Image (cartoon, rainbow, N blue to C red):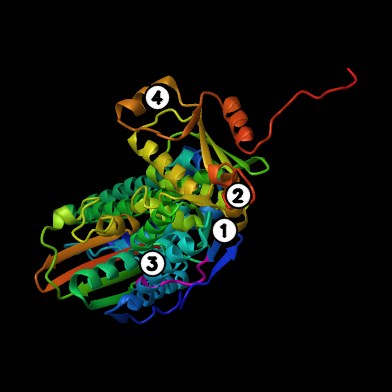
Amino acid sequence: MTEPRPPARFAIGNSSDIVTARQAARALSAHLGFGKAHQTRLATAVSELTRNVIQYAGEGSCLIEDLSDDQERVIRISIEDHGPGIPNLPLAMEDGFSTSGGLGAGLPGARRLVDDFHVSSAPGLTRVVIAIRKPA
Amino acid sequence: MTVSLPQFLQAHRDEMLAEWLAEWSSSSAVGLAATSSTAQTRHVMQTLFDEILSQLMVAPQDPPPGLDEHAPLCKHLRHLAAEQARHPEVATDPMRMMFSLRHLLLRHVSTWIREAGTTPVAEHLVQVNRYFDQIALFVFNNIINLRDRHISEQSLSLMELSTPVLRLWHRILLLPLVGIIDTGRARQVTDHLLEAIARHEARVTVIDLTGVPIIDTSVAQHIMKTIDAARLLGSRVVLTGISPEGAQTLTKLGIRFGDVICRATLRAGIAEALLIIGKRITAMEDQAR
Amino acid sequence: MRIPILRLDRILLVSIQEDLTDDEAMQFQSDLVNRVAEVEALGVAVDITALDVVDSYMARVINDTASMVRLLGAEVVICGIQPFVAMTLIEMGRDLIGADCAFNLEQGLEMLRARIVHRGDTRFTGDEDD
């Protein structure tokens, strides 16, 4: 098995950073041998979540880590911002709910695209951690 | 003059081994004795026997030391488990083999205790028992693990086998679904089908549900997703073979296949598909009969 | 980067060749809508074969653009959605893309022509209203 790649952190500040982050996520998943379906799902989830950062907090960061071991290939991506937070998290996780006039597919949509999904939010720190995994 | 247990075991080693081998080969006309060559089994048994015996030579400890996963003993036990996993009809053989050895050893240790007349009797018997408990657990775990892996490998290949996407005609695909569809399989079927649609640029895909015994909410949702995704590629889906029970269940579950074309039989579905691509099947004319 | 819009008689062809940022997507939307009005286009084919990520934002841009174009009296077809992109869109939510779709530009054009032929405003060839 190849050495895990070092973690990569991306600043998210404008709409071209979204493209950079999702392309990096796709490149890593391709490198680790995930299929096209997985690659596309992960890249799309990263796109949704980093766009939320720009839309609601203005800026934040996206950390992409390779946590693979002998048993499993794992990519974990943590997206953080220091914005006002998500006021009603359970509501935000519902399909079709949006405070920004979007389609409301962002959070619940991204959750369906990945294997692990954790979100925590308070004023000053919102963090979404997602992961995809497959047997090595 | 009393004989110590190690001395006693050493003295009777050949006798006990012969007894064990004889008992084993007479007790199992089928199973390991029959499937693997006798010489090979004898070799494995002999090694196991010596390993186990050497463990019993050391003074009893409380609590007894755990099995060393990397010791030669465990290697042989794993080999035994692996050998067994290939022959499911004799699943209990390695355990029976170990139990017969335990029985034999207990009998001999009891004899020694009687002859030597030493006092700490229970200690040695307990040690033998505990030791075999560990061995039994180890073998059992190994067998279970191997089985599990075997089963998941099989279900994976079964999944690939059972979802063929057939080219029915130029730009018409047929997906006959057969059997129970769970979430894992449904997702795989969908990915598989979409790739085929894109590759063949299929205008129409006929999904035949005749072989699906139960259409529940999750199956229905997966079919809906597949239809929607196919539409995004530019292909239409014709559903065939929904049973009357299936239709009732779907409607009661509140699932509407709104603008989906449904036909009762595969035959009607194929006719519909041909119509969509502007073809039809007609009788040959002017043929010599 | 501006996306070139090609004109084939009264049909417009657009092929998006790169991953777009949000700003570029909005630019594309307004460029296309303006061009449709300018040439009184009857049909628009948008080829997105090269897009390997279509998130809900991009889906909305595509959908909105299609609605705007329809309001201007033209037919729209989206061409070349990748199978995995289609699956991802459906996983995120049904109906993210409501426009008609085709495998590739060639079939998209075929579809547009077939529709345009059936429209009242094109039943009469030539310039009868002059």
Residue identifier under label 2: C113
Magenta stretch mostly in which secondary structure?
Answer: loop
Numbered label attached to residue A43: 3
User: Residue, x 53% and y 66% (percent of image)?
Assistant: C15
| Pick the front one: B125 or A72 | A72
Q: Which residue is mark 4?
A: B247
Disc 2 crowd, CA 10 A, few/some/many (<14, 14-19, 20+): some
Q: Specify the amino acid type for callout 4.
A: Ala
Disc 2 to disc 4, how far (Cα)? 38 Å
| Residue type at tag 2 | Arg
Whole-number angstrom distance, CA of label 4 to CA of label 3? 38 Å
**Which residue does the image show at 39% across and 41% down from the upper left?**
B182
Residue C18 shown in magenta: yes
Q: Secondary structure at mark 1?
A: strand
- Measured as percent of width and height from the top left, residue C57 is found at 34, 62
Q: Which mark is residue B122?
A: none
Would you call the spot at circle 1 few (<14 residues within 10 Å), some (14-19), or many (20 or more)?
A: many
